[in-house]
Image (cartoon, rainbow, N blue to C red):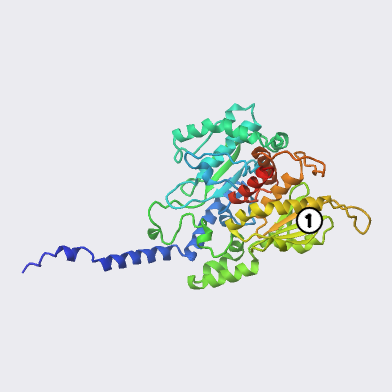
């Protein structure tokens, strides 16, 4: 007897079965995107990066935030800060905040460099490597080598950027060059670092390691560390493209620095035990790592650092310390002494927004400090300086440093006297001083919200 033909209800999964199926797929995806798989994928991609450096004999530069996950710190020469958003279609930009001029010295000394980054599933190159860096090379070549027009052409990877898009970027290059020149950076020292112009090249795990370079250029090799995955990760045996991206969503506070120091222990630990291990390692190492307690000069008489440096700096004669605390505190509790103010702003974007209301108090406090001429025990008036501290030493502290650089110093870097009449601040003047800070400390990372607060205060202070 022939089998009965199944009914439609029997062929189509019932609603509960569909729900279970979706849940199973979700569980599979989450298990594949585990911390263990991410760390093993990073380890795999880091081996490729090392092989590129060995083959090309060029120094490795990490494009942050994720580039450092793929480079052994012992082989990392520098960090770079090229944003993929500056290369997004229709939004091309030459960043005057992220100038990356420190790379000129690296490329000139070693006749090139390798800049390492990654991208998530489906893409061959991140936009930072395929468009932002090529734009940067073309702009600097035009500014530094005006007498070599052959170096002024925009070079992009043909398999990632269309002719139409390349043409549209090229049309904006003259404006980008003018925005760079508006920073009024001395060109001569930059030109002295390079023997010849820059030229971008690209390499991925799908390419042979036999790139040929012209003797007419310093090669800037854009290395995409991750292997391209065109389907879902479920068929990749646990491999995750761009595993080092979006660490705030999976790393539990783990940093690239801690990863490289403890990678063997991390990759050998069962997934269920990793959260506890990472929590312990982060607590032992501290989020600031080796930079804790250090301060760095960002402008004449202005330094930034992490909050751990407060005690040492308070003991330094002639130093005004501005501590930006990760908790909100009432304004009437901020001033601790004539040379120390603790400003409770809180954390993240909320802190950046609260900075706008705090800057008048901070700048007023700084002005009073500069007017103080009390001699020390030896009868001399020590040279004045500001030290601004925050949790990272790279965001809020840099924003306040910019505000004080504008508020307390004129265009030549001289301290405003009590009789001086400050001119109204302009976006250009503020951008020039920010450019100087970023050129001095390339890894400074003031958020957009922080900079908006600084701009808002400085440009509105006369109103």
Question: Taking 154 as reference, is 306 left or right?
Answer: right
| Figure quadrant of the N terminus | bottom left
State the residue at coordinates (88%, 55%).
374
Q: Residues within 10 Å of mark 1 (few under 14, many from 20)?
A: many
Quarter of the view holding residue 388: bottom right
State the residue at coordinates (53%, 43%).
86
In the image, residue 200 lies at what x, y percent? 56, 39
State the residue at coordinates (45%, 41%).
160
Q: Residue furthest front?
A: 463
- Residue 323 visible in the current orientation: yes
> Disc 1 on helix, strand or loop?
strand
User: Relative to 414, does residue 373 appear above or below in the rendering?
Assistant: below
Q: Nearer the viewer, residue 393 or 114?
A: 393
User: Relative to 222, does residue 38 appear above or below in the rendering?
Assistant: below
Q: Nearer the viewer, residue 158 or 15?
A: 15
Question: Taking 302 as reference, is 272 left or right?
Answer: left
State the residue at coordinates (80%, 56%).
319
In the image, residue 37 lies at what x, y percent? 47, 63
User: Relative to 122, does residue 30 appear above or below in the rendering?
Assistant: below
- Residue 214 visible in the current orientation: no
Which residue is disc 1 drawn over?
A: 320
Quarter of the view holding residue 426: top right
Q: Nearer the viewer, residue 84 or 19?
A: 19
In the image, residue 331 lies at what x, y percent? 69, 60
User: Relative to 245, does residue 428 appear above or below in the rendering?
Assistant: above
Question: Taking 33 as reference, is 46 left or right?
Answer: right
Q: Residue furthest right?
A: 379
């Amino acid at each position: 007897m022939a089998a009965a033909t199944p009914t439609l209800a029997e062929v189509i999964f019932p609603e509960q079965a569909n729900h279970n199926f979706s849940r199973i797929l979700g569980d599979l995806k989450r298990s594949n995107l585990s911390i263990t798989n991410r760390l093993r994928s990073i380890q795999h991609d880091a081996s490729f990066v090392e092989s590129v450096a060995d083959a090309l004999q060029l120094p490795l530069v990490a494009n942050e935030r994720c580039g450092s996950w793929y480079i052994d710190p012992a082989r990392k020469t520098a960090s770079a800060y090229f944003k993929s958003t500056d290369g997004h279609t229709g939004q091309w930009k030459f960043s005057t905040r992220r100038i990356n001029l420190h790379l000129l010295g690296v490329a000139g000394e070693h006749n090139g460099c390798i800049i390492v980054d990654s991208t998530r599933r489906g893409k061959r190159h991140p936009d930072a490597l395929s468009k932002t860096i090529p734009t940067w090379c073309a702009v600097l070549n035009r500014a530094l080598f005006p007498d070599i027009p052959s170096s002024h052409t925009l070079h992009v990877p043909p398999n990632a950027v269309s002719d139409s898009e390349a043409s549209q970027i090229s049309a904006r290059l003259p404006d980008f060059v003018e925005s760079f020149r508006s920073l009024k950076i001395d060109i001569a020292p930059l030109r002295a670092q390079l023997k010849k112009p820059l030229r971008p090249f690209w390499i991925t795990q799908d390419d042979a390691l036999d790139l040929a370079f012209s003797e007419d250029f310093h090669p800037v090799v854009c290395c995409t560390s991750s292997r391209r995955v065109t389907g879902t990760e479920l068929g990749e045996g646990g491999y995750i493209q761009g595993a080092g991206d979006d660490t705030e969503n999976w790393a539990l506070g783990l940093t690239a620095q801690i990863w490289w120091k403890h990678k063997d222990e991390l990759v050998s630990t069962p997934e269920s035990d990793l959260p506890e291990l990472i929590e312990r390692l982060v607590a032992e190492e501290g989020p600031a790592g080796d930079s804790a307690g250090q301060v760095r000069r960002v402008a004449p008489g202005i330094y930034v650092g992490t909050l751990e440096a407060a005690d040492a700096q308070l003991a330094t004669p002639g130093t005004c310390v501005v501590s930006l605390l990760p908790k909100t505190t009432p304004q009437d509790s901020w001033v601790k002494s004539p040379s120390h103010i603790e400003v409770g702003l809180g954390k993240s974007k909320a802190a950046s927004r609260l900075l706008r209301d705090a800057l008048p108090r901070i700048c007023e406090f700084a002005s009073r400090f500069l007017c103080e001429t009390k001699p020390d025990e030896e009868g001399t008036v020590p040279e004045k300086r500001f030290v601004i501290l925050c949790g990272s030493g790279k965001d809020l502290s840099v924003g306040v440093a910019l505000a004080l650089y504008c508020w307390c110093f004129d265009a030549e870097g001289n301290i405003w006297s009590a009789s001086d009449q400050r001119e109204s601040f302009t976006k250009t003047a503020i951008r020039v001083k920010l450019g100087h800070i970023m050129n001095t400390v390339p890894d400074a990372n003031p958020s957009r919200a922080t900079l908006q607060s600084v701009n808002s205060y400085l440009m509105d202070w006369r109103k």
